Amino acid sequence: MTGRLVIIGAGQAGFALAAKLRSLKDERPITLIGAEDVLPYQRPPLSKKYLLGEMEFDRLTFRPENWYAENAVDLRLSTYVEQIDCSGRRVRMQDGSWLDYETLVLATGAAPRTLPAAIGGDLEGVHLMRDKRDADELAHEMRPGRRLLVIGGGYIGLEAAAVARARGVEVVLIEMADRILCRVAAPETADVIRTIHLQHGVTIRERTGLTRLIGRGGRICGAELSDGSVIDVDFAIIGIGVAPNDGLAQQCGLEVGNGIIVDAFGRTSDPAIYAAGDCTQLPWKGERIRLESVQNAVDQAEAIAAVLAGGAEPYRPKPWFWSDQYDVKLQIAGFNLGYDETLVRPGMREGSVSIWYFREGSFVAVDAINDAKAYVTGKKLLDMGIEPDRAILADAAADLKQLLS
């Protein structure tokens, strides 16, 4: 193909796709469209080292500005697509102009879920944590002695709590489910992470929802919780999950479920349109899943680039994730969907532990907390399709290398 490729979304997936095509010597015209006013950048460090003031923003950008011109990537920032005309193979931009394409890729990511205005979601001082503007706003809020309410006990909320404590902020975290990490990790993993946060001074209130945020002069000053208590707060962070940005796909009639439905080659229900990253629902071991991770966004986008450049290899996800909280590194290999059994293995160092997940007797994932050896071993086992010996796993003194022999 030599016609124009238009990529909607200049995040991890969108950039990875453009860069991979150029590395494969594909010379078709590429237009990369991003809504933000800054060069495409890595998001994970935003809520950690950038927010802590340990990393300048320039270090987060994927490439310097001149890279785009040198690689013939037409980068359009501070704009967005309002409509896709599938039959005419064109998109209508924010300013009303039309841009033709031969191939279109949706790399629109996901958006944080918000709180309704009726319960105070529109008050000043109520924040999300997704992009640079969010991080910059929070940097001004996080001052020693102030009090933060974190709404949601998933990874977003817990990572925000850890950064806030590092900046001397008092933190109250509420989770309406029975425990933190309810959707994404086993109780054993949640127990370890909870203990770490309690040791760092975070107040965690599980089985506690939000009734409403209280404002004074248009700014948050407190919160009424589901147990009837009222607490004073200076600002809040909403961490109640994300939803796929699939609005454009829905408007133009693409097949959509929990995200834009794609096949193993990244193709949507329109043969000229592909999709990659957090906005997609993709096939995996006979099921359809969404993988909200940098790793998947990059790998899926690069697999699509290879297909566009003439390859024929389907994308086979090999999920892995990570979360940094304080001096704790949680590394996850595999996908624990539908697990029905876990095995807890103490690590060789103090404070290290791994939780191994099984589904119908088969190994499906591992959570490694400050235990790189367990993570690497588990990932290799999954990649090689090897079932670990339960006796070796259960023996804390046994060398994990034996599992690979």
Image (cartoon, rainbow, N blue to C red):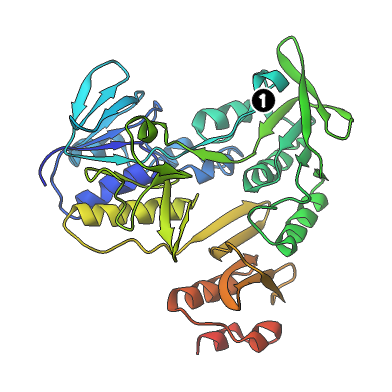
Quarter location, residue 354: bottom right
Q: Nearer the viewer, residue 14 or 199?
A: 14
Q: Residue furthest left?
A: 2
Q: Position of residue 31 (x, y in %)?
A: 23, 34
Query: Is 58 on the left-hand or right-hand side of 127?
Result: left
Q: Position of residue 395 (x, y in %)?
A: 71, 86
The answer to whether residue 398 of the structure is visible from this angle is: no
Query: Is 29 on the left-hand or right-hand side of 139?
Result: left
Q: Residues within 10 Å of mark 1 (few under 14, many from 20)?
A: many
The answer to whether residue 243 of the structure is visible from this angle is: yes
- At horizontal 57% and vertical 63% (from top left) the residue drawn is 332
Q: Position of residue 349 (x, y in %)?
A: 70, 73
Query: Is 235 on the left-hand or right-hand side of 43?
Result: right
Residue bearing the label numbered 1: 126
Q: Three-letter amino acid code at disc 1?
A: Val
Q: Position of residue 39 (x, y in %)?
A: 36, 33
- Labels in figure, total: 1
- At horizontal 61% and vertical 39% (from top left) the residue drawn is 52
Query: Disc 1 on helix, strand or loop?
Result: strand
- At horizontal 37% and vertical 46% (from top left) the residue drawn is 13
Q: Nearer the viewer, residue 151 or 148?
A: 151
- At horizontal 44% and vertical 66% (from top left) the residue drawn is 285
Is residue 264 placed above or below 77 in the rendered structure? Answer: below
Quarter location, residue 7: top left
Is residue 36 placed above or below 175 in the rendered structure? Answer: above
